[in-house]
Structure formats: structure tokens, C-alpha cells
Image (tube, rainbow, N blue to C red):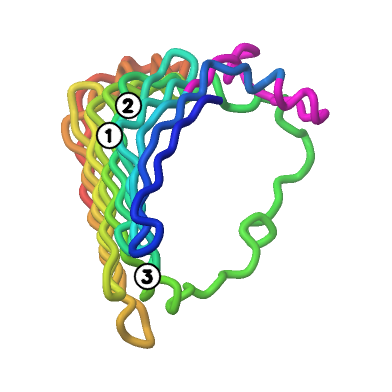
Amino acid sequence: IKYTMALTTLNTSPTYRGDINLQAVNVRKLLALFDVTLDTANASALSKVAYQSQFNGDVSAVNITNIVLGVDKTTFTGGVAIKDIATQALSLQLAGDSLNADDYLPLEEPSSTGAPATAAAIEGPEEPLPLDMIRSLTMEVDVSLNKLQIKNLDVENITYSLKAMGGEVNQLFVADAYDGNITTKVDLNAKTSTAKAEVDFQVTGIELAPILQALAVESKAELQGAVTITA
């Protein structure tokens, strides 16, 4: 790890700036030193991780800019800012190029032949929403990814945004897949003693046949056409 930092106006209002450069490191080998073994589908996953950024700030705020995070074949760029340390107001922007999430998933194990667990046993008791924590959030998050492969399915032009302030949390997820579009919007209002949530989920024009092929689902009927769902 290489870094530089300069401090100014120490006697009055201290400020600082600098940069960090982490050259490519093999995280798998690093964790092995602590007897930690990663169980991933791709045995080479996390074998090359690098990071660099610049930073500046003072006693009330921190800015991390020009982030370049490399994880194997994927590159993320962006910035993070704590606009007000006292209130922990956070801003995050992150953009990635192409990610194969299947490489990082655990190896699939043969399914158990035992009796399936009940839904209650799997999910457990319902936990109440932490309303006080939600009301204290001040956050803006914007994340995007050009291409994603997960469970052998291909998704493109992914954007996710989250805005939280004053007890309101608004989330929006948009992506393209198989000639169609997926949009999910979630609005949560925790200003009162009882939180209210609105969920809008839409799937438009997604072709069914290539999804079944990607999932290796065999069907005697040749299913074709597009799927449209609104909930």
C-alpha cells in the first residue's frame, strides 16, 4: 500500500488531502494466511484486487474521489463523501463495467433428500423495522453496472438509486434483460409510528425462450414470446 497525505492549517481549521494506491493483491492467498478458505465457483475469484483514490476533508467532512477499484476482470469507478460527519450524511456514486457474479457464488451442493423445512422455520419470526435508524438516515446512493451475469442469466444497463432523508427512503432499480426491461420502485415512509411502503414492480417485453435456455430448463413445449408483469 502506498499513500501520501498533506495537512494544512493545523492551528485553526485543519484540512487534509492525499491519495491511496493499493497494488494488485491476491485476496485468496491473503485470507489463507488466516486459515480462511473462500468457497467460490471460480477457484481464481478474488485473486486480483487493486484500489486507488484521492481524498480530502476537514473536521466536518470527508471526500474520497477518483476511486478506481479493480476486482479480477471488473473495474468500478466513482466517489464517496461524508458530507457531514456529525449527522453521517453519506453520498456514494459507483459505476462498473462487466461483472460475472457466478464466479463469486459458492459451489452448488447436491440437494438434500430430506423433508423440506417449513417457511416459518426458514424465515424465522418477523423482525420489526428499525424506525429510529431509518429516520436518522441521510443518504444518496447511485450505482450502475453495464453488464451482469448471475445464475447464468445476462442483465445489462443496470442502475440503482437510493435517497434517504427525514424518514423517507426512495429506491429505484432499472435494468435491461432479453429484449425487455425490469423496473422496481420502492418508497418507504417512516415518519409516523407505523411505516408505510409502496412497491411498484414492472417487467416488460422480456423474451422467455432464452431465459429457459440459460437456466437449462427443459420443456416439451417450445415456449416463445415476451413476458409482461405489473405488480
Residue 123, image x, y percentages = 61, 58
Q: Quadrant of the C terminus?
A: bottom left
Mark 1 Cα shell of 10 Å, populated few (<14), some (14-19), many (≥20): many
Magenta-colored span: 30-50
Label 2 to label 1: alpha-carbon separation: 6 Å
Please give the label number shown on residue 87. Answer: 3
Amino acid beneath label 3: Thr
Relative to 6, does residue 210 appear above or below in the rendering? above
Residue plotted at (43% across, 38% down) = 5
Label 2 to label 3: alpha-carbon separation: 29 Å
Q: Considering only order in the chain, which callout, 3 or 2, is on the residue closer to the N terminus? A: 3
Q: Predominant secondary structure in magenta?
A: loop
Looking at the image, which residue sits at the far right? Answer: 35
Residue 230, image x, y percentages = 21, 49
Mark 2 sits on what residue?
96
Q: Quadrant of the N terminus?
A: top right
Q: Considering only order in the chain, which callout, 1 or 3, is on the residue closer to the N terminus? A: 3
Residue 87, image x, y percentages = 37, 70
Closer to us: 55 or 71? 55
Looking at the image, which residue sits at the far front? Answer: 11
The quadrant holding residue 115 is top right
Mark 1 sits on what residue?
144
Q: Is residue 35 magenta?
A: yes
Q: Considering only order in the chain, which callout, 1 or 2, is on the residue closer to the N terminus? A: 2
The quadrant holding residue 25 is top right
Q: Are marks 2 and 1 in contact (CB under 8 Å)?
A: yes
